[in-house]
Image (cartoon, rainbow, N blue to C red):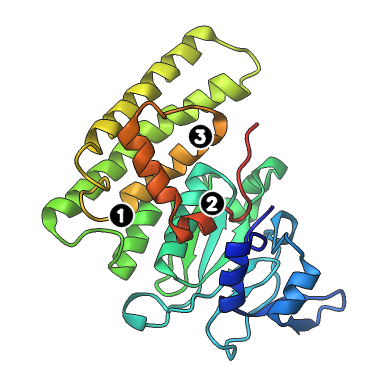
Amino acid sequence: MTAGLGESAQRKEWEDGVHSVVSLNSKRRYRRFNIHSCFDIYPDEGVGRDLAGLASGGEVDRSFRPGWILSPSPQIRWSRRHGAAGRKHEMIDLYTDSSPNGFKATIALEELALPYRLHHVKIDDGAHRQPEFLALNPHGRIPVISDADTGVTLFESAAILLYLADKTGRLLPQGTKARWEAVKWLQFHAASMGPLLGQRVHFEMFAEEKLPAAIERYRRLTEEAFSTLDARLTDVSWLAGDEYSIADIATFGWTHIAAICGFSFAHHRNLLRWHERVADRPAVQRGIALPAPATGP
């Protein structure tokens, strides 16, 4: 199943929340479908991999009642809420693909219920090397956000998470100690865990030449990172302490991929328990399906 519509629990949520789907037909005129038509048109597939692209597409009629609104190219998501303190936010453009770093941004946006427009940057097709995308991130990496509210454009997933938390006043504890715990573990992820797992994926699964020394090195280093996280989670529910935060979102982006790749951390009981708790969150389940679920090589 691709993004969003299909399983019964998700279907009920969409039926409760979606009021319209805007689609661009062959004559470049907009047609509106109610939610029941949406299931007839895209049965079990939702707005999937082939419908979310870099090309410009449907525009949202702002007179619609607040609800989830999907547009095939790019995919547009409106929250039932309008962010912090009920204030209406302008649309955030998110450029991403199905990857651990991309899922950090989609999970955060789903958790925060901010309206955003999803552009699927298909890395396998080289879309991240096109001039339009390089104008947003000259390093050619996803994710990228561009916020019409502030005029800010950001790349690097940790910077994006910090920005979204600052924008909304959520997902980052207010207390000084807990706040810096969240930042510390976010930085541990960005500087240690994420890069190490990325190298392990490369050498163990994608490198044309299998180098036993490199494979052993990154297995050992990722195991050390898992052990560090497991020890941290011995007596706390979340990485920052008592509150779920952007540190948890960032770390889950890679534990999710580690599990898909078969890099087991089941022997780290605290880490496994934390991972399962994060995975159960509805916003996380939506986030890891956008723009499409990740699969192993």
Question: Is residue 263 among what the camera can see?
Answer: yes
Question: Is residue 23 among what the camera can see?
Answer: no
Residue 188: image x %, image y %? 29, 37
Residue 237: image x %, image y %? 26, 47
Depth order, front residue of 185/38: 38
Give me the C-alpha separation between circle 1 and circle 3.
21 Å
Q: Amino acid at mark 1?
A: Ser
Residue 99: image x %, image y %? 55, 44
At horizontal 43% and vertical 57% (from top left) the residue drawn is 281
Residue at label 1? 245
Total marks drawn? 3
- Secondary element under disc 3, as helix, strand or loop, is helix
Among numbered discs 1 and 3, the one appearing first in the sequence: 1
Please determine whether, in this image, residue 40 is positioned above or below residue 142.
below
Please determine whether, in this image, residue 212 is positioned above or below residue 204.
above
Tag of residue 46: none
Q: Amino acid at mark 2?
A: Ile
Among numbered discs 2 and 3, the one appearing first in the sequence: 3
Q: Residue furthest right?
A: 27
At horizontal 42% and vertical 31% (from top left) the residue drawn is 195
Q: Residues within 10 Å of mark 3 (few under 14, many from 20)?
A: some
Q: Amino acid at mark 3?
A: Ala
Q: Is disc 1 in contact with disc 2, using a CB cutoff of under 8 Å?
A: no
Q: Quadrant of the C terminus?
A: top right
- Secondary element under disc 1, as helix, strand or loop, is loop
Residue at label 2? 288
Give me the C-alpha separation between circle 1 and circle 2.
17 Å
Q: Residue furthest bottom?
A: 63
Residue at label 3? 259
Q: Is disc 1 in contact with disc 3, using a CB cutoff of under 8 Å?
A: no
- Of circles 1 and 3, which is in front? 3
- Of circles 2 and 3, which is in front? 3
